[in-house]
Amino acid sequence: MLEVRDLSVSYGGLRALQGVSLAVGPGQFVTVVGPNGAGKTTLFKTICGVVPAAGGSVSWDGAPLLSRPASARAHLGIAHVPEGRQVFRTLTVRENLEMGAWPAAGRARWAQTLERIHTLFPILAERSSQLAGTLSGGEQQMLAIGRGLASAPRLLMLDEPSMGLAPAVAEAIFERIAQIHKEDGLAILLVEQRVAEALELSDRGYVLETGRMVLEGPYETLLADDRVRRSYLGLGEA
Amino acid sequence: MLENVLNAVAAGLIIGCLYGLMCIGLGLIFGIMKVVNFAQGELLMLGMYVSLYLVGGFVALGILGPYIGPFVAALLAGPVLFVGGALLHRFLISHVSGLSIASRTETGGFGQLIVTLGISLILQNGGLIVFGSTPKSVLTPLSARAFILGPFPGGALLFLNQARVYSCAVAIVVAIVLWLVMERTRLGKSLRAAADNPVAATYMGIDVDRAYRIAFGLGAGITAIAGGLMATYLTFTPFVGLDYVIIMYSGVVLGGMGSILGAFWGGLTVGFVQQVSALVLPPQLQNAAIFVVFLLIVGLRPEGLFGRSAERA
């Protein structure tokens, strides 16, 4: 479905990504982990057309994606829940969700998706007419995810959904993401710093370090790897 | 004395509504899209001239007559300047606003200042060449007629200029329609979303450049309609915009940035203060009175009279 091949990105001469490849198939849960500054957000922004690529390709359903305008992604079925949530602060919760349903697919299934979003995050129904800027961080993250779901996507891209949240709230968010993946069969591409929780949920994981993919494989393989255990999970040798 | 007060208050409210509509136009561009547009006064001026020539056209065709014609012309100045504004945005202002400067906000504002100041000067002097320097006005017999109300206690009579009253009514209707469009329609919500967070709006699939273009066109068109309406009761030259651009900015800031209703109330407040201050101040000081009230309100309520506090959070 989504295929990133040999992607390179430079910021003013500095290589942020170098030869990065990854693939997400229908209904798969794929996670990219790595330390701060490894290029995780850059990878997302490049896929989403906000940052230009220096080399390599990204394809969606076999068709090249990088040449399309950034706003085309949502219409093609790719929803992006950005880093730092980025809700529309001056719009109400309900209006935020309506904007998520901007693409034709989201509009066509608006009634069902809204009900689904309210089932997943009942607080959003409660706060429906409140300005999004007045929500707490966790609620804003729920809204950002709901807004992504409102477009009735086939792939949900989540950039650090746990950032800045209390552990209990982050835990709840991860549970919802797992639920969305299982019950809706939605493909998910997740970028996370909370490695243990993130890998636990996923079918396949990638480890990104200083702009390169250093490791990839199914959850069990990654967990068995000494480097992952030491650097990210704080565990000793297997 | 009572008669003077009564008439000044009534004139203040009526002219205030027209200022309110004018401010909504700038409110869209400056308050919501955050584009500093010095040429807004010239958009008002163009609205007046477009309306003037349309009325000339109606007269030549022998349609609509002197009562309906000027108001239809004022409303039509809206779509004309919508297109003009959208083109202006497409070819000039988009380069110094919106997504193109989203990543370099610290320098973007200066570009807008220079570009819109330049557009303003070109339109003023271009207007001088095309329209001439003779003061013009849109002719309607209504300008010379008044509704007379009263007598009120003490024998006071209230004179309401008919051109102003009808212009005020049209302005209120246009303001309500625009408010409904921005609050209730998908298009209006997408414009607000694009202004709130252009990058996130792009992720939603909204074409942000197009949204900004539409918003700028709407802002230009609304101010032009206000200009066309005001042209029925005052005389104007290509430099008329200078008198009003400051009034528009004070109205928008007074009302609280980012709110359509706020811009309208801000404009109403400015018009009211201007007219009522004429009771005690010589005409040269009327605009000074506006700024005294402006400074008072900004000092006491920095978020504006009707600003939403969440936007500042």
Image (cartoon, rainbow, N blue to C red):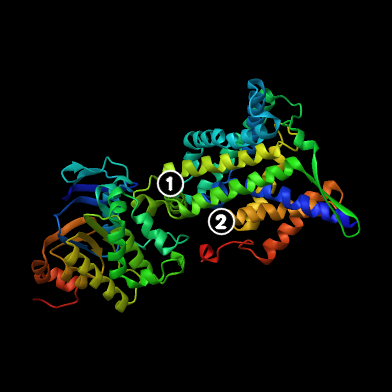
- Check disc 2: other Cα within 10 Å, few if <14, some if 14-19, many if 20+: many
Q: Which mark is residue A8?
A: none
Q: Is residue A141 visible?
A: yes
Determine whether A176 is above or below A73 in the image. Answer: below
Q: Which mark is residue B259?
A: 2
Image coordinates of residue A190 in percent, x first then y, are 23, 62
Q: Chain of mark 1?
A: B
* Closer to the camera in the image, A233 or A73: A73
Q: Position of residue A63 (x, y in %)?
A: 18, 41
- Left or right of B11? Residue B300 is left
Mark 2–mark 1 Cα distance, whole angstroms, equals: 21 Å
Closer-to-camera residue (B172/B155): B155
Residue B269, image quadrant: bottom right
A93 vs A31, nearest the viewer: A93
Residue at 33 percent of width and 54 percent of height: A101
Image quarter for residue A151? bottom left
Q: Residue at x 73, y 62 (%)?
A: B296
> Which amino acid type is marked by label 2?
Ser
* Circles 2 and 1 on the same chain: yes
